[in-house]
Image: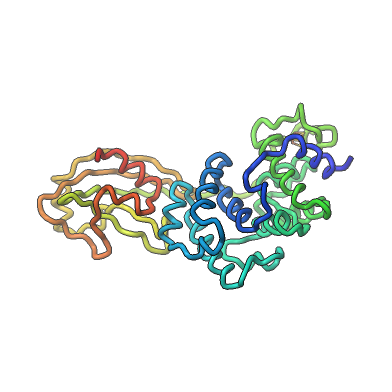
Amino acid sequence: MDFAAILLQWFKKNGRSLPWRETNDPYAIWLSEVILQQTRITQGTSYWERFMAQWPTVNDLAAATEDEVLKAWQGLGYYSRARNLHTAAQQVVELGGFPQTFKDLKTLKGVGDYTAAAIASIAFSEPAAVVDGNVYRVLSRYYSIDTPVDSTKGKKEFQALAQSLLPTNEPADYNEAIMDFGAVQCTPTSPRCNTCPLCETCIAFREQRINELPVKSKKVKQRKRHFTYLYIEYEGKIAIHQRGAGDIWQGLWELPQAEQLTSATDNVWKTEAQPLQKGVKHLLTHQILLADFYLWHPKVHPQLPSDFIWIKRQNLDNYALPRLIEILIKEIPT
Ligand code: SF4
């Protein structure tokens, strides 16, 4: 049996049973693929179920407001995915339906090679190979390939190899099989080589270099940032504002930061506010955030920039918040 046949056989016995695998609705499949990028299956599944219940069709999602979509996305991180999802849903409606080929799917906002291949193969049976982190890992180990997977050369090489291995009559099962195999059997650490149906022909296993593969060339540089947040409560209301474009958390709502206060107000809060937490660490992909958090009950109405609004605490649920802000606010008793 060849590589693909072994994987397909493994998949029949060990494939994960997931709700979006019960359908070939491109909307449901697309939603699952977008949610599951950077998200664990267990967490992603509950989000997928909620999105499908709230917006059962792409038309429903397109008709939602961006705020509603961001709110439903809250807790998943990488909010540009939610904004792209919303824009792409509107594109699909304008087009009169889902594009049905790998090439046309890529015209949708936020849909790259991986997502287009997943939708094209699973919903429309197009023989387009998916290449994600699981696929890089399985192929680099099985064939003992040293080319860095994050290099242009590596991306081309692995894409071509994945495509050459794809059985054209079973693209959906094969794509799902190799991704599940990477997630369940050939895992990043401690792969289950002893029970692996590919171990007899796996080169990395034979050469005992599993832990060296896949190779990555770039080290992600992380930027450290410091934020000082104030929970300002005045006459039963708290101040929040929506973050703009060009930085993290675009479109999400947050509390005032010390630097946003006017200098007159600034001097007052320093004497009146009560420190609640210092140096709360929050990790993003390329940034390390350190947040100090203060509680302030000002005696007079504080001056804030005009984009701030005052809302009742119980209405905070209507606003999409970054996870860090959500965590900080939970510290304040209602
Ligand atoms: S033998 Fe080990 S390294 Fe090779 S494919 Fe199987 S699980 Fe992965």
Q: Please state which of residues 24 and 256 is positioned toward the viewer in this rendering.
A: 24
- Compared with 91, 57 (above or below) is above
Image coordinates for residue 112, horizontal then vertical, percent: 63, 60
Q: Write the residue at 67% across / 47% down.
A: 22
- Dividing the picture into quadrants, the one containing residue 10 is top right
Q: Please state which of residues 129 and 225 is positioned toward the viewer in this rendering.
A: 129
Residue at the limit of the structure toward the top, as seen here: 194
- Compared with 63, 168 (above or below) is above
Image coordinates for residue 323, horizontal then vertical, percent: 40, 46
Image coordinates for residue 328, horizontal then vertical, percent: 32, 42
Image coordinates for residue 21, horizontal then vertical, percent: 67, 47
Q: Write the residue at 48% across / 48% down.
A: 76
Would you say 332 lies left or right of 299 here?
A: right
Considering the image in quadrants, where does the C terminus appear? top left
Q: Quadrant of ligand 1?
A: top right
- Compared with 232, 196 (above or below) is above
Q: Write the residue at 71% across / 46% down.
A: 176
Considering the image in quadrants, where does the N terminus appear? top right
Q: Write the residue at 27% across / 54% down.
A: 256
